[in-house]
Image (cartoon, rainbow, N blue to C red):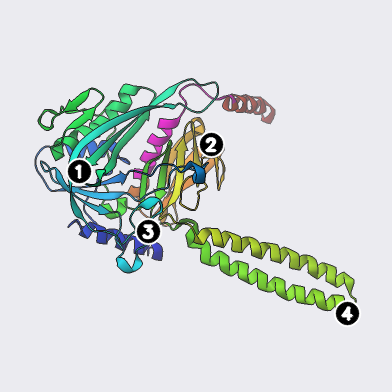
Amino acid sequence: MPEPSTAAFEAEVARALRSLEADSSVPALDPLGDPAGAARALSAEGGGAPLILRVAPELGALRREQDTGFGPAPRDPVWLRIERGASVLRLAPLRLAGARHARPEAGGAGGAGEGTAEPREAVDVQLISERRPCCGAPTCARERTYVAAWLALATEERRLLVAEAQDLEAARAEALVEAVAAPLAAALGVPLETARGTEPPGAIAPRPFPEPAPTPPPALPAAALSRFAIRSEGELLVLRDHASHGPRGSAARNALIGAALLLAALAFWIQVMRSVSAGDSGIAIGVGSAAALLSLAGYAFLGVARFSSRYAARSAPVVSFGPGRFVVAPWVSRTGAIDLRPEGRLGAAISAGEVRDIRVLPRGDRFAVEIETDHGPIDALLTEREDVARYWRDAMDRAVASVRHAGGPSAKQRLRARAQAQQAPAAG
């Protein structure tokens, strides 16, 4: 049985999909998580049934005076229903919970119960690019090219992120994004704007997926796809769990623990006063020490509960990928924004060059995506479906490759290999 919070999330997603006249079991495309699969489906010949896509809204600008040291506040992705040859599409939020349970989303996004599927007019698909540092190492002067495809809508001057890639080779990054952007623009019958100019709807040339082209797995059902999503947040690539309440989920438990500890401390302080009145200083000192520790622990738990209850985001980050490194379970602000410091709840960031393998392993009746590194394995993601785990294993593999420093082993890896080589004869 799914957890209560997960079951509630699945019901909200099903309600959002029904507003698009789509069932939770229909295949859905996520060009940000599986660009090859989306490119193949969008390039398929013939009219066919309407397509369900999941894309990402634009994030708000960083508020430097308030959010220094954090990325932008996250927003839920949205569903699109498109029909080939029609520039009018239908847009719905990731989830719809009904007006009673609606709550505003951090960063100005709509809450779970706000809005329904409404028609929107697509204007064009725009490609933008920028240069970013390779890995952040002071001795590395290389730069990566980041390319993103945005779907511009006629109303509210809104645009949606539909594909993105970064690579040391600018041509490869452009080819990866154009392989998705071109068939999407052709399907909608809107212009495609690239660095080379504007291609009108009837003259958009097909783009082959750059070699080596992976064999995309079958598209996941919308319900299975909905929980996890990956996208860029500032210069970080972040995989989020949208069924998780984040720190807010533990607020009530921490408050109860804190209150229980303070009640126990109160009983101990009463005993201290009685011991002092009876002139038993030894017992007073011992019980007083225990009372002080319980008071500090209770106050700490209540402080954590207070922070957790104010967590405004509707998701929790699973892993973030930055220049040359990644962090599992990164720290977040109350808005859900990622802490830009290279550390998280499980420790310091790990170099992307120290990743040996990313694999799917069974964990009881669930499946884990495990990142094997030079420092040992880390379970990054846990899900009930093996196909979902494999889907996000592939996405994480691409994310690590996109931030890894190109070159040989790092200095730490060379030192570690030398030490292991010296220890081998001694062990023998």
Mark 2, residue position: 350
Write the residue at 45% across / 38% down.
321
Residues at marks 1 and 3, CA–CA distance in whole angstroms: 24 Å
Indicate the position of residue 287 as horizontal and vertical percent values.
Answer: 80, 70
Mark 1, residue position: 154
Give above or below for 2 relative to 412.
below
Mark in front: 1 vs 2: 1
Mark in front: 4 vs 3: 3
User: Magenta part of the protein: which range?
Assistant: 391-411
Q: Which of these two is toward me, 68 or 354?
A: 68
Mark in front: 1 vs 4: 1
Identify the amino acid type marked 1. Ala
Label 2's element?
strand
Indicate the position of residue 320 as horizontal and vertical percent values.
Answer: 46, 41
* Label 1 neighbour load within 10 Å: few <14, some 14-19, many 20+: few
Residues at marks 4 and 2, CA–CA distance in whole angstroms: 58 Å
Point out which mark residue 278 bears.
Answer: 4
Q: Is 332 left or right of 261, judged from the image as shown?
A: left
Write the residue at 66% across / 70% down.
262
Mark in front: 3 vs 2: 3
Q: Who comes first in sequence, dot 1 or dot 2?
A: 1
Q: Who comes first in sequence, dot 3 or dot 2?
A: 3
Residues at marks 3 and 2, CA–CA distance in whole angstroms: 34 Å
Mark 3, residue position: 104
Q: Which of these two is toward me, 230 or 352?
A: 230
Residues at marks 1 and 2, CA–CA distance in whole angstroms: 43 Å
Indicate the position of residue 62 as horizontal and vertical percent values.
Answer: 44, 42
Identify the amino acid type marked 2. Ile
